[in-house]
Image (tube, rainbow, N blue to C red):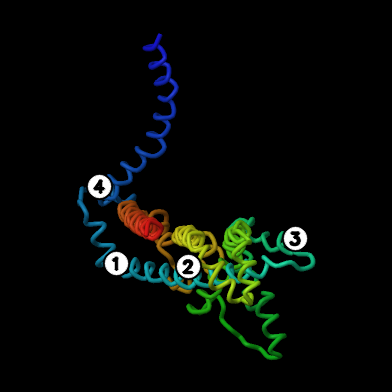
Amino acid sequence: MKAFDLYYKWILVIPSVILLLVLTVYPTLDALYTSMHQYDAMIPEKPFVWFDNYKNLIFEDERYRNASYVTLVFEVITISIQMILGLFLAFLFSGDFKFKKIITSIYLVPMMMSPVVVGFTARIAFTNDYGFIPQIIDFVLQKETNIAWLSDGFWAKVVIILADTWQWTPFVFLIIFSGIMSLPNEPIESARVDGANSWQIALYIVLPQLKYILLVTFLIRALDLLKLFDVILLSTRAGPGIQTETLSVYIYNLAFRFWSMGNATAGSFILLIVIIIFTSTLIKFITDYENK
């Protein structure tokens, strides 16, 4: 009877194991195999080249280095803006004011929208001929600014940063706001009795207790920005030229525009290694800091 129970448990597990192998292990191994070949859909031969695809991308491909730089710029600037805004709004909404629940619900709407909609809306909004953003700016300044939002490299980056910030700052706000609401009230009330003002309470009592929540939020947004794709492709189309082309967009172009599957899979594995190192380092930092 015990032997039957053992086999019965294995029979129940086997379908899940097979599904896991088919959906994850096999595609990963096949992609690794492809990344070590000169795998071009336009060339019949697929010679084995070891790590040449990786070496060419890192040391010889100027476009890959440009995509890495653009990705880093978006990471640093966008996360900084979203964390600061999310933290400020979380402190602001932690107080009581009229229509708080209604305003909070409305503010969370962008987070629920598809990135495709956000990217397409950003392109329409910032088009100089009929976009409402240039019209609002011209009306406020009472003059024609003629900013080339989508045809200038700097302003195209600004459009993407603004679009992503508009969509995902509510997510950052929601996590930090939930963390603030879960904190005990006793230290805050004691500080108020001792004469501390709101800024002192936020800086010296609330903020230190939110450090893990802030780090986790930072990690989630950093990983999400590494795969930023939809908004870029639909708003600026990675232009002008390649000035807003990130790693995810370039890897997509390698695979489905240039049909260079070997280089595309090699670029994907490089990005995966960067994500693993970044995530492991941050988690180790959080763990070590907690154990002190």
Is there CB contact under 8 Å for labels 3 and 4?
A: no
Label 3: how many residues lie within 10 Å, few (<14), some (14-19) or many (20+)? few
Q: Alpha carbon of mark 1 to alpha carbon of mark 4: how far?
A: 21 Å
Q: Disc 2 versus disc 4: distance between alpha carbons?
A: 30 Å
Please indicate whether residue 181 sits to the left or right of residue 29 in the image.
right
Residue at the image point whose x is 36% and y is 12% from the top = 3
Q: Residues within 10 Å of mark 2 (few under 14, many from 20)?
A: many
Amino acid type of the residue tagged 2 in the rendering: Ala
Residue type at mark 1: give it.
Asp
Q: What's the CA distance linking mark 2 and mark 3?
A: 38 Å
| Residue 127 can be seen in this image | no
The mark tally for this picture is 4
Answer above or below: position of 165 versus 287.
below
Q: Helix, strand or loop at disc 1?
A: loop
Look at label 3 and name its amino acid: Lys
> Which residue position holds label 4?
46
Q: In this rendering, does residue 19 appear at all?
A: yes
Q: Quadrant of the C terminus?
A: bottom left
Whole-percent x, y for residue 29 in the image: 31, 41
Looking at this view, is 50 or 94 the one in front? 94
> Disc 4 marks which amino acid?
Lys
Residue linked to disc 3: 101
Q: Which residue is mark 1?
A: 61
Q: Foreground mark, 3 or 1?
A: 3
Residue position for label 2:
238
- Considering the numbered disc 2 on the image, is that residue within a helix, a strand or a loop? loop
**Which one is earlier in the sequence, the residue at label 1 or at label 2?**
1
Can you tell which quarter of the image residue 260 is in?
Answer: bottom left
Q: What separation in Å lies between label 1 and label 2 (alpha carbons)?
A: 17 Å
Tell whether label 2 touches label 1 (CB within 8 Å): no
